[in-house]
Amino acid sequence: MTLSTFNQDHIGMAFEPPAVYVPPRLHDTHLVYLHTVLPLPDGAEVDYLLNGGPGPVEGISVVLHPAVNGVLVNHAFLQSYRGPWPALLEVRYLKNGQPADLGRLPLLDPDAAVATRLQVDVLNSPAVIPSTGATEVVTIRPRLFDAELIPLPRGFGTVIELLDPHDGIRQYDGSFIVTDAAVAGEYRVRVTTKWGLEQTVSFTVASTPE
C-alpha cells in the first residue's frame, strides 16, 4: 500500500517481535507489541489490512490502551484463514480518515516452524513444603525460537517430564504442584522438543522453616 504524500504523519511504527507464529492451540492468544517513535495522539484511529484486503478478520484485533498498544492474534485466525503463508498484516495509523503511517507484521504458519533455540525458565524455585492442605506451584516454562529469533507458540512441540517423581508432587503440563506430602530435595525436569532440542533443569523443594 502506498501512503498519500499529502497525508504523511509518520510516527514510526514497529512490532515486537517483528513477526508472529499464529497460536495453534484452542483458546491461545499472543500479544505482539506495537511501538512508535512518536506517541500516538489522543483518540488515534487505526485500521488494518490482511494481504491487502480490509478487516475485520476473525482472530485478529488491534489494541490501543494507555498501558499497551499491540495486536492480539488468537487460534481463531488459524481455524478460519485459507490464504497463503506468511500472511501480511498492515496496521495503519489514520489521519483525517486517511492512512498516514503503517507497520507490517508477518503472520507465520506454526506448522512450518523449526525451532533452533530452547530456553527453559524455572519459576518459584525453591518452593517451601506447605502446611497441611495447602500447595505451592513451581512452573517450568520452555521458550523456543526459530533461526530469526522469532518465538514459537507457548508449549508448541515440547514435552515436559519429571525425572524424579514423588507422590507429593503432581504435574499438570509445565506446572508442578508441591503438596504437604513432598520431600525436600532437588527434582530434575527434562524438556524435549520434536526438533531434537533438549534441556534438563531442576527445581528445589525446601523444608518448612522451624
Image (spheres, grey):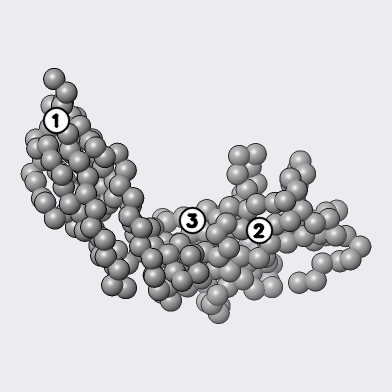
CA separation, marks 1 and 3? 38 Å
| Residue 17 spot, x, y in % from top left | 55, 59
Residue 30 is labelled as 3
CA separation, marks 2 and 1? 48 Å
| Residue at 50% from the left image edge and 69% from the top image edge | 148
Q: Residue furthest bottom?
A: 84
Dot 3 lies on which element? Answer: strand
Which residue matches tag 1? 207
Q: Are marks 1 and 3 in contact (CB under 8 Å)?
A: no
| Residue 48 spot, x, y in % from top left | 68, 62
Q: Are marks 2 and 1 in contact (CB under 8 Å)?
A: no
Q: Is residue 58 visible?
A: no
Disc 3 marks a residue whose amino acid type is His
* Image quadrant occupied by the C terminus: top left
Relative to the observer, which residue lies in front, 139 or 6? 139
Could you tell which of marks 3 and 2 lies nearer the N-terminus?
Answer: 2
Relative to the observer, which residue lies in front, 41 or 206? 206
| Residue at 88% from the left image edge and 60% from the top image edge | 7
Which residue matches tag 2? 14
Could you tell which of marks 2 and 1 lies nearer the N-terminus?
Answer: 2
CA separation, marks 3 and 2? 16 Å
Q: Are marks 3 and 2 in contact (CB under 8 Å)?
A: no
Image quadrant in which you'd find residue 84 = bottom right
User: In the figure, 110 relative to 199: above or below?
Assistant: below
Disc 2 marks a residue whose amino acid type is Ala
